[in-house]
Every structure is written in structure tokens, then in C-alpha cells.
Amino acid sequence: MTEQTTDAGLTLLGEGLFPWWVLLLWGILAIVLGFMFLSSPGITTELLITFMGAFWLIGGLFSIASLFVDRTNMGWKLFLAVIDIIAGILILTYPLYSTVFILGFFVIFIGFYACFIGGSYLFQAFKTKDWGNGVLGVISLIFGILLLLHPLLTAGMLPFIAGIFCFLGGFSAIISSFMIKKVQVKA
């Protein structure tokens, strides 16, 4: 049963949704990015945040330009465009400070989210007498509290964690690309 499901999934991927080499290229780029994160985490993170700032700035300008063609939801589009432009300018003007701020904000957001999810699991555990949800709730709460108690330390570790995930994702993508290639060759 599992092999049929796997074959069916690979068959779908092999039927031309995208060529196998796209996934191979994705995997190679992910490994390169992982190596960059692990070898020089500060510069790589600052570079990615700077690209994000440029993306927001250009996206905001294009959003304003699109208002000349499509005026639906004009107020909302204009508001988001202005926010994008301001964020882009701030990031491009102060890339180092922006990197520290964005990583810190990201960690704090995840910390609050983990506490919220942990509380939800605990509530569900007490309501349904399910100890599994209780364990997940306690783990999520502990994780969230640790993130909130040490946000700068955690923010400093994010590039290393991202590098490890890039390596794992890259190797998985490369292996999957060769599996898809086999299916595409058979088809």
C-alpha cells in the first residue's frame, strides 16, 4: 500500500508538473545557502534581510503603480504599499540594525505563538482528559517561555538552525529529484 502511494506520488511528479532538474537545482542552491549560513552566519543573514528590504521596496512601488490599472481595494493596497516602501527603505538604510530587529522580532513572535499553542493544548487536555495534548502543551509552553526569556541568544542561533535546515532540505530535494528522474525516464 505504501509503495503504491509513493509510486502514485512520484508518478504525479513525473507527469510533467516540473522537470526533475528544477528540484535538483533547488537542492543544490539550498545546500549552498546552508553552507553560507554555517560558514558566515552574520553576513549571510544580513544579506538576506537586505534582499528582503529591496523586495519590499520594489514590491511597494509596483503595488502603487498597479493602482493605475486596477483600483479595487485601493485604500488597502495603498496602505500595504506604503508599509512595504517604509520597511524597505528602513532595512536598506540600516541593514545591520534591521537584521537584529527582524530576527529578534521573529523569535519573540514564535515565543508568543508557542505559548499560545501550549495554552490551547493544555486547555484541550484538561477538557478532554487527553494526556497527549497535555504533554504537547507543556513542551510548547516551555519552548515559548525559553524563547521569550532569551530572545537575543535564540536570534543569534537562527542562522545556524536555518543552515542545518537548508542542508537537510537540499539533500532531500536532490534525492527526490533523482527519484523523479527515474519516473520521468520510464514515462
Image (spheres, grey):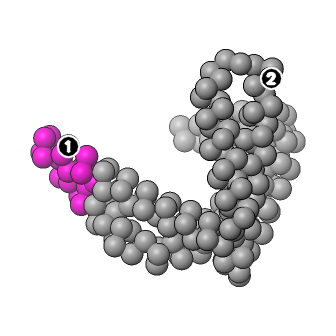
Instruction: Point out the stretch of residues depicted in magenta.
Output: 118-139
Residue 172 percent across, percent down from the top left: 67, 59
- In the depicted view, which residue is nearer to us: 82 or 167? 82
Q: Is residue 187 above or below residue 53?
A: above
Residue 72 percent across, percent down from the top left: 67, 17
- In the depicted view, which residue is nearer to us: 96 or 40? 96
Mark sitting on residue 68: 2
Q: Is residue 123 magenta?
A: yes
Frontmost of labels 1 and 2 is 2
The alpha-carbon separation of the residues under discs 1 and 2 comes to 50 Å
- Residue 16 location, quadrant: top right
| Mark before the other along the chain sequence, 1 or 2 | 2
Q: Is residue 95 magenta?
A: no
The answer to whether residue 182 shows anywhere in this view is no
Mark sitting on residue 124: 1
- In the depicted view, which residue is nearer to us: 30 or 180? 30
What secondary structure is marked by label 2? loop
Residue 93 percent across, percent down from the top left: 72, 64
Neighbour tally class for label 1: few under 14, some 14-19, many 20 plus, Cα within 10 Å = some
